[in-house]
Image: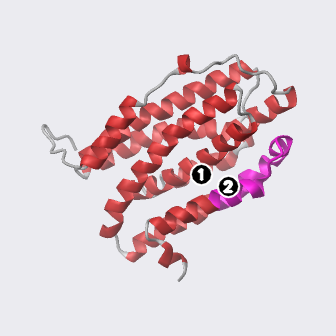
Amino acid sequence: MIHVDPSMTDEEFLRLFEKGIQAQWGTDQIDWGLTEGISEPKKLALGQLITPVYLGEQTAMLGVSAVLPMILTNGQAEPALYLASMGLDEARHFRNLNHLYRVLNVEPLPSRRLPEMWRYHARLLQKHDPVQWVFGILISDLFAKTFYGGFAERFPDTVVGRLSRRTLQDEARHQAFSDRYLNRMLPTMDPDAKNELLVLRDDLFRIMEKLGERLRGPMEVLDWSPEEFLKELWGDTERWVKRLGLVSLTEV
């Protein structure tokens, strides 16, 4: 999988990598003291609702480390270069959320309370196929976008809102990577392999429906509902399915 001097000619991936480098940021760029206006019940609810995203950032780091060798084995140096920078993004998100829990003085849900998250991330890597993982991570980025967007909307002038808005910029780059990678790989796949991507989508949403029920209580504290969340996420996902040209398969 290692090449001494790989040819790097895909300018789109290289530009995305450079953009990722220039957009790096750290904990010192967030005002962690902006907690005024977040009541104790809402802090507790936030602690619970952030948990699946918190776990997701950690498992995304593991996913990148698992998929990188597959990408390199396929001789795809430019996507591998971007994925390495994406690993840093995920690590930063994990570090920031870890610090946010201390700032809010709340704790995440115990892992045993969210078994769906382990099922979700096991499903992402079930096929040991980079295209499946990238499509799954696109859905995961949309999942994170919906959560972070909801936090930014509900807590705009607090540390939660500001941290969420900065993180959304990273998530947008990750979606751009998925778009580029999938648009290059999908034309090389047969209809059955493409249909497996939609099976993955449906499996992930079934898991998320169960997760939503577990989080109904804290979501309602923030005037949110699992149904509202999943409707927005499904709409985003379907727009991407159509954009990627998989829409004809959904209509069969």
Q: Among all residues in the image, which is located at the extreme front? A: 157
Task: Using residue 127 as the reference point, say whether residue 16 is left or right of it.
Answer: left
Give the camera-side residue of 128 and 246.
246
User: For the point 38% across and 59% down, which residue is it?
Assistant: 182
User: Which element carries disc 1, helix, strand or loop?
Assistant: helix
Give the camera-side residue of 119 and 140.
140
User: What residue did someone put label 2 on?
Assistant: 208
Residue 223 highlighted magenta (yes or no): yes
User: What residue did someone put label 1 on?
Assistant: 120
Q: Are marks 2 and 1 in contact (CB under 8 Å)?
A: yes
Placement of 36 over or under 58, stated as above or below: above
Residue 39: x and y in percent read 85, 27
The segment highlighted magenta reads 205-234
Q: Among all residues in the image, which is located at the extreme left? A: 5
User: Which element carries disc 2, helix, strand or loop?
Assistant: helix
Within 10 angstroms of label 2, few (less than 14), some, or many (20 or more) residues? some
Q: Magenta part mainly helix, strand or loop? A: helix
Query: Is residue 96 visible in the rendered structure shown here?
Result: yes
User: For the point 35% across and 42% down, which residue is it?
Assistant: 16
Query: Is residue 129 visible in the rendered structure shown here?
Result: no
Give the camera-side residue of 232 and 70.
232
Task: Using residue 222 as the reference point, say whether residue 247 is left or right of it.
Answer: left
